[in-house]
């Protein structure tokens, strides 16, 4: 897969994550409560969805800029790989805490069966897996750069 196709798909994935976490952040900011009636995880005094939104927004901006500048290096892929790994660790830590509560007190139905942190984790994992596959499974940098230069 060439870098152009990667960036098109990544813009969509990061936009979806930014929209979801942005919605959660806006509801929390303006109403003071979580969008789906869940407990709101707090990190360093702020709701976790604010941090998720910042990470998704950073990936979206980086990916969009790389796409419009027609970047052919693997740097945007590595950028998304690093930030999505950070997002996996961040959201995953909250999911582990939620699972511990479920084990202790029983499962509680949430937004479509999962918590919003779990959905954030899924978005981050999808971006990570996609980026890693493009970087490693498809022939690495040479094929990514080579394919992009054909356009």
Image (cartoon, rainbow, N blue to C red):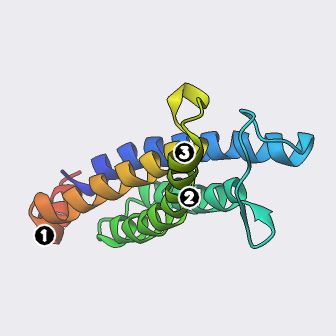
Real-space Cα separation, disc 1 to disc 3, in angstroms: 46 Å
Among numbered discs 1 and 3, the one appearing first in the sequence? 3
In the rendered structure, find residue 87 and report the number of the disc placed on it.
none
> Comparing marks 1 and 3, which lies closer to the viewer?
3
| Mark 2 touches mark 3? (CB < 8 Å) | no
Q: Nearer the viewer, residue 115 or 73?
A: 115
- How many residues crowd around disc 2 within 10 Å: few (fewer than 14), some, or many (20 or more)? few
Determine which residue is flagged by label 2: 97
| Mark 1 touches mark 3? (CB < 8 Å) | no
Among numbered discs 1 and 2, the one appearing first in the sequence? 2
Determine which residue is flagged by label 3: 102
- Image coordinates of residue 96 in percent, x first then y, are 49, 58
Residue at horizontal 30%, vertical 71%? 73
Q: Nearer the viewer, residue 53 or 35?
A: 35
Residue 104 is left or right of residue 137, and the answer is: right
- How many residues crowd around disc 3 within 10 Å: few (fewer than 14), some, or many (20 or more)? few
> Comparing marks 2 and 3, which lies closer to the viewer?
3
Residue at horizontal 73%, vertical 46%? 39
Q: Nearer the viewer, residue 145 or 129?
A: 129
Q: Residue furthest left?
A: 139
In the rendered structure, find residue 142 and report the number of the disc placed on it.
1
- Image coordinates of residue 85 in percent, x first then y, are 41, 67
Real-space Cα separation, disc 1 to disc 2, in angstroms: 41 Å
- Image coordinates of residue 40 in percent, x first then y, are 74, 50
Circle 3 SS class: helix
Q: Residue furthest right?
A: 31
Among numbered discs 2 and 3, the one appearing first in the sequence? 2
Query: Is 106 placed above or below 99 here?
Result: above
Residue 53 is left or right of residue 103, and the answer is: right
Residue 32 is left or right of residue 132, and the answer is: right
Q: Residue furthest top?
A: 112
Instruction: Count numbered badges in the picture.
Output: 3
């Amino acid at each position: 897969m060439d870098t152009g196709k990667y960036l098109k798909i990544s813009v969509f994935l990061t936009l979806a994550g930014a929209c979801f976490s942005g919605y959660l952040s806006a509801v929390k900011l303006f109403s003071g409560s979580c969008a789906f009636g869940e407990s709101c995880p707090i990190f360093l005094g702020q709701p976790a969805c604010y941090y998720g939104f910042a990470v998704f927004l950073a990936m979206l901006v980086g990916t969009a800029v790389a796409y419009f500048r027609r970047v052919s290096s693997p740097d945007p892929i590595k950028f998304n790989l690093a930030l999505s790994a950070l997002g996996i660790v961040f959201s995953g830590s909250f999911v582990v805490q939620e699972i511990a509560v479920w084990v202790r007190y029983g499962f509680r139905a949430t937004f479509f069966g999962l918590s919003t942190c779990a959905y954030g984790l899924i978005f981050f994992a999808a971006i990570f897996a996609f980026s890693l596959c493009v970087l490693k499974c498809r022939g690495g940098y040479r094929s990514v750069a080579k394919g992009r230069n054909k356009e």
